[in-house]
Image: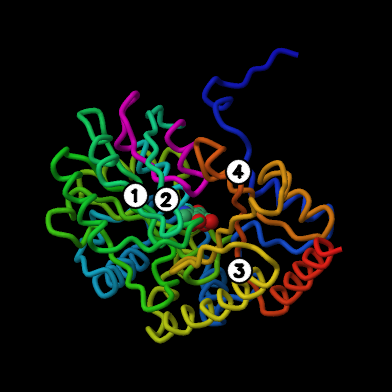
Amino acid sequence: MKDFSSARAMKFTESVIREMTRICLKHSGINLAQGFPDFAARAEIKEAAQTAIQADLTQSAITWGEPNLRHAIADKFAWYNGVTIDPETEITVCCGSTEAMISSLMAIVNSGEEVIVFEPFYENYGPDTILCDAKPRFITLHEPDWRFDEEELTQTFNNKTKAIIINTPNNPTGKVFSREELQFIADLCLKWGVIAVTDEIYEHILYDGAKHISIASLPGMRDQTITINSISKTYSLTGWRVGWAIAPAPLTASIRKVHDFLTVGAPHPLQEAAATALRIDRSYYETLATEYEERRDFLSGVLDDSGFRIYRPHGAYYIMTDVGHFGFSDDVAFALHLVEKFGLATVPGSSFYSRSSLGATKIRFCFPKKKETLEQAAEKLRDFKKDREK
Ligand SMILES: Cc1ncc(COP(=O)(O)O)c(C=O)c1O
């Protein structure tokens, strides 16, 4: 049969993470591959959604977002990120940060322009650049502390560079970009007229006293930054699909157009509930970080005991590990072994790199899970260890 697929769609593969989830289901395993929480969201947020549905908020909201939510986003961005924005002209509410990212890139990038992407990257960024016909330029974050080479980054900026994608705290490495690193990037953006597109969905999941800095808050960057966020990670609501892009008014006008024709809008009642989430008591964020830190420490300890080399994350909810010394042919072979023999799903490191060899000895674990789930995962890791010692 003739293949009617577009050349564009053929340039990237299906999500490796979701594929690992399917294999995990087949083996009735524990899923530490896909980063979604298996615990309940806060009762008042769920109640707000129920109330909104009962109140018949059934039709589409304004395409760029329910005013109540946009005001809540602006208020929170002022207190937490230190940037004052106009909710009328500088916010586009989207279907998750996934849609906010692709709508933003499509709104700013012309065919053939370059977009700088740090690797290892969140797996959507590669396909995102392909979908907007950009040329991705990859800059490696080097383990163990995932720093970039300043000279390499400086040399990569040029007249064709349109945007640089930043993700802090970072998936998959757990890196939290420091003020100095962000200032270095900001100086290059200002010099070359480049837009920073920053995905900050893990902004409250921080460990060891790490501080989240928004590049939009650095001098001169407010007008050259698109800040992307969502309710998915902070409020454990990955299935509600409510996110947003914050950008200066002229950019927002373009993002809103793309967004309108891609999705029209995020679910109306869930936007109302998202506004409730964003106005939650501020102590919630401290509890969130503390609980995640306990999970990080638990899983790090088990991985360490089981012989994995771990890169300790300072933010987000993933642990990148090195498994080269276990003697498998590559990361995919190792991940398949772990899920097929022991029922524990993870993500092969190569899926986070443009050059798969850079991830060939790495495996990512995620830990947004109940204590019981992590205990079960620990059991499987102990089985793995015993099997190796045989
Ligand atoms: C860095 C990063 N950005 C975006 C997303 C997707 O977020 P959303 O559910 O808001 O689309 C994820 C999910 O894992 C992520 O890790």
- Say which label, 3 or 2, has the lower sequence index: 2
Q: Residue at coordinates 33% horizontally, 63% vertically from top-left?
A: 70
> At which x and y percent is residue 130?
46, 31
Q: Amino acid at mark 4?
A: Ala
User: Disc 3 vs disc 2: which is toward the camera?
Assistant: 2
Q: Residue furthest right?
A: 390
Q: Which mark is residue 148?
A: 1
- Say which label, 1 or 2, has the lower sequence index: 2
Q: Amino acid at mark 3?
A: Phe
Residue sitting nearer the eye, 149 or 84 = 149
The image quadrant of residue 151 is: top left
Q: Which mark is residue 142?
A: 2
| Range shown magenta | 107-130
Q: Amino acid at mark 2?
A: His
Tell me how far mark 1 sits from mark 2, CA to CA.
Answer: 6 Å
Q: Amino acid at mark 1?
A: Phe
Secondary structure, mark 3, is loop
Secondary structure, mark 1, is loop
Q: Which residue is mark 3?
A: 367
- Say which label, 3 or 1, has the lower sequence index: 1
> At which x and y percent is residue 57?
50, 64
| Residue 176 vertical position relative to residue 347 in the rendered view, above or below | below
Q: Quadrant of the C terminus?
A: bottom right
Asked if the magenta segment contains residue 88, the reply would be no
Tell me how far mark 3 sits from mark 1, CA to CA.
Answer: 26 Å
Q: Residue at coordinates 18% horizontally, 55% vertically from top-left?
A: 222
Secondary structure, mark 4, is loop
Other-residue count near label 2 (Cα within 10 Å), few / some / many at <14 / 14–19 / ≥20: few
Circles 3 and 4 in contact, beta carbons < 8 Å: no
User: Disc 3 vs disc 1: which is toward the camera?
Assistant: 1
